[in-house]
Image (cartoon, grey):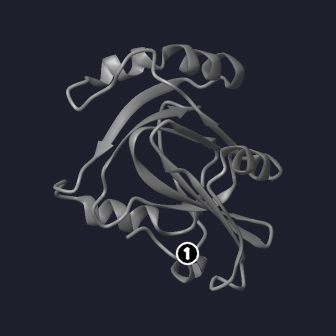
Amino acid sequence: MSQLTKYHQDKPEHCILNTKNSEEIIATLSEVDIRFARWNASFPIDSNTTNEQILEAYSDDIQTLIKSEGYQTVDVVSMHPTHPEKAAFREKFLSEHTHSEDEVRFFVNGKGLFCLHIDEHVYQVLCEKEDLIRVPANTTHWFDMGSQPEFTAIRLFNNQEGWVAHFTGNPIAEQFPLLD
């Protein structure tokens, strides 16, 4: 189940908010310009569903985002516990960074933890199956997929280059909880 936990940046041991209520998650995140939504597939998805079929199952929602936000590229990415580079990928995403474009992810299955450093707070958003998150351009954040990652996600990009990070050098991410 999706979850939002909010901390003051200087007190990672003290949670200000912890909720699994979708409406509260959406409302709290919208106050800081983070979009969080839930999508439903137009037909059942299972482990044999191809990437093309996944995109078709969510095509109406994807097209709505493309038309409203101007995204140019859409793809599907998967990570699994046996991936040979899982540790290297996890490490890369765990450092605080920004992007010059929105970071948009929709979780077809599995989970991931987006940690957003906005003003003096850290918002940890546990995204799971059917969760969409849009982190606006230039928002400082990091992402944890866990030590045994298992997810499939749809990614939308504003540019053809895809994921390009600008690391801040701030060690704040090391102070906050990670996925198990």
- What residue is at 56 percent from the left and 67 percent from the top? 96
The image quadrant of residue 38 is top right
Residue 144 placed where, x, y %?
A: 45, 62
- What residue is at 31 percent from the left and 41 percent from the top? 78
Residue at the right extreme? 31
Q: Which residue is mark 1?
A: 173
- What residue is at 35 percent from the left and 38 percent from the top? 77
User: Foreground: 82 or 67?
Assistant: 82
Quadrant where the C terminus lies?
A: bottom left
User: Foreground: 27 or 21?
Assistant: 21
Above or below, 74 against 53 in this view is below
User: Foreground: 18 or 30?
Assistant: 18
Residue 99 placed where, x, y %?
A: 60, 50
Residue at the front extreme? 21
Q: Residues within 10 Å of mark 1 (few under 14, many from 20)?
A: many
The image quadrant of residue 158 is top right
In the rendered structure, the answer to whether residue 23 lies left or right of residue 40 reads right
In the rendered structure, the answer to whether residue 91 lies left or right of residue 165 reads left
> What is the tally of numbered marks visible in this picture?
1
- What residue is at 33 percent from the left and 25 percent from the top? 45
Residue 79 placed where, x, y %?
A: 29, 48
In the rendered structure, the answer to whether residue 87 lies left or right of residue 16 reads left
Name which residue type carries label 1.
Ala
Where disc 1 sits, the SS reads helix
Residue 150 placed where, x, y %?
A: 30, 51
